[in-house]
Image (cartoon, helix red, strand yellow):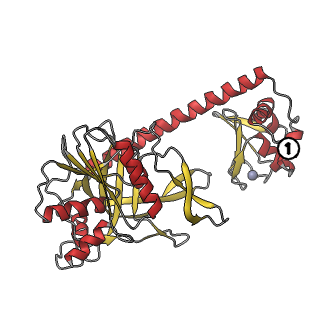
Amino acid sequence: MARITDDELDDIRARNPIFDVASGYTKLRRSGGKLLGACPMCGGKVMSGRFEVFEKDNSWACYAHCNTGGDVISLVQQVEGCDFRAAIEKLGGRTEIDAARAKELFEERERKRLAREKTSADYREAERKRLFRTWKSAMPINDTIAARYLEGRCLVLPEHCPGLRFLPTMSYWHGETIDERGRKSPRQIYSGPAMCGAFIRPDGKFGGLHLTWLNVVTSPDDVTAPAPVKAEILDPDSGEVLNSKKMRGSKTGAYIAIVMHDAPRRLVIGEGIETVLSVWTAMHQAGRDLDDMAFWAAGDLGNLAGRANKTINHPTLKRPNGQPQKVPDRFPDLDDAGLSIPESVEELILLGDGDSEKVLTENAMERAARRYARQGRVIRIAFAPSGLDFNDLLKAAAA
Ligand SMILES: [Zn+2]
């Protein structure tokens, strides 16, 4: 049997409303806007949990014992204990879709997709506002645990660093918990002091947060105590060490201002906060004139360089199945604007860390150089030696 098309599947679902099919298996009653009944699989009663049918999106879920759900086809599969093909046959099988029916089904899918997108856009905006409230509640970074963490890495903070702040307590969320009614909610697994950076979007608005959780070894007031380090955060279930850095909200095209300038002539951009601060520190300590310069952190390599026009095979690295690994190419997809570099920038300095994968980093740097090239603008790419980042160089110099 040929592959069943999306149109045919949508047609089967449309011909078999979830209410009709589920009602054939169990008695459903309306309660509020919901349809509830005993679960036809596990027998779970309304009292002990819920078997629910959602007419709006033609789906079902059992919160009693099954803890699962799906569409009308999966309902038939589970109740009848049959496979996908057999379930489709029980639901009347596939029928020929003519052009008019295909168009109807396509329009219905589009309508649903747009509704979903609107919901997720609303969700993202709500998340951005929550993060902005967190940002406004944060303290200036100077003289905090975060400042001491940076000092411990031989980094000097500029006198004015509007893009970085400190949060005495910040929650770390990881995974989800499911309550007895089957509802999912994010799970807080850790809480502690954190350095935070604000991502500024191309339209000048706050976009999201860059967070680095820190461990305080001893009293933060004891100046002779060892400097704070990045927190070790473990997944309580697997014991896996989690990344002590997180980016939340939207960072696309956005940057963290390490050193701000209204109309910089020179601009330094690197991936991480520490990388960019390392270069600032080195230039500052060398007594260089930095008056016409701005320093930005892009958060990650993809954001620094923007989207590639395609991916290519990595020259040497292979996937476990023996196929070459894919990496983004050196040429930009110009539909993605990338970071919005001020028109005033005559010299753009891009920092490539030597501790990231070499081909990936080199491609990203070249892509960024092509994307941000302008008449009268010089673009320099500075690579840290292989296996090192700029902060390692700084620490080696200070030792
Ligand atoms: Zn059940």
Q: Is residue 6 above or below residue 361?
A: above
Location of the N terminus by quadrant is top right
User: In the picture provided, is 244 more to the left or to the right than 174?
Assistant: left
Identify the residue at horizontal 70%, vertical 53% (top origin).
Answer: 64
Establish if 158 lies above or below 74. below
Question: Where's the C terminus, which quadrant?
Answer: bottom left
**Residue 135 vs residue 22, the one in the foreground:** 135
From where the camera sits, is residue 248 visible? no
Q: Secondary structure at mark 1?
A: helix
Left or right relative to 218: residue 190: right
The kind of residue tagged 1 is Ala
User: Residue farthest to the top?
Assistant: 100
Picture quadrant where residue 334 is located:
top left
Image mark count: 1
Q: Is mark 1 within 8 Å of ligand 1?
A: no
Residue 349 visible? The answer is yes
The residue nearer to you, when weighing 370 against 233, is 370
Number of other residues with Cα within 10 Å of mark 1, as a class: few under 14, some 14 to 19, many 20 or more: many
Q: Which residue is mark 1?
A: 87
Residue shown at 40% from the left, 38% from the top: 337
Residue 365 image offset from top left, x and y in percent:
39, 53
Q: Can you give x and y, in whole percent of width and height, for residue 37 in the image? A: 75, 42
Between 345 and 21, the one nearer to me in the picture: 345
* Residue 305 falls left or right of residue 327: left
Tell me the quarter of the picture where residue 287 sits: bottom left
- Which quadrant of the figure has residue 262? top left
Residue 248: x, y in percent? 41, 51
- At a point 33% along the width and 66% down the height, the residue shown is 384
Q: Residue at x 37, y 54 (%)?
A: 299
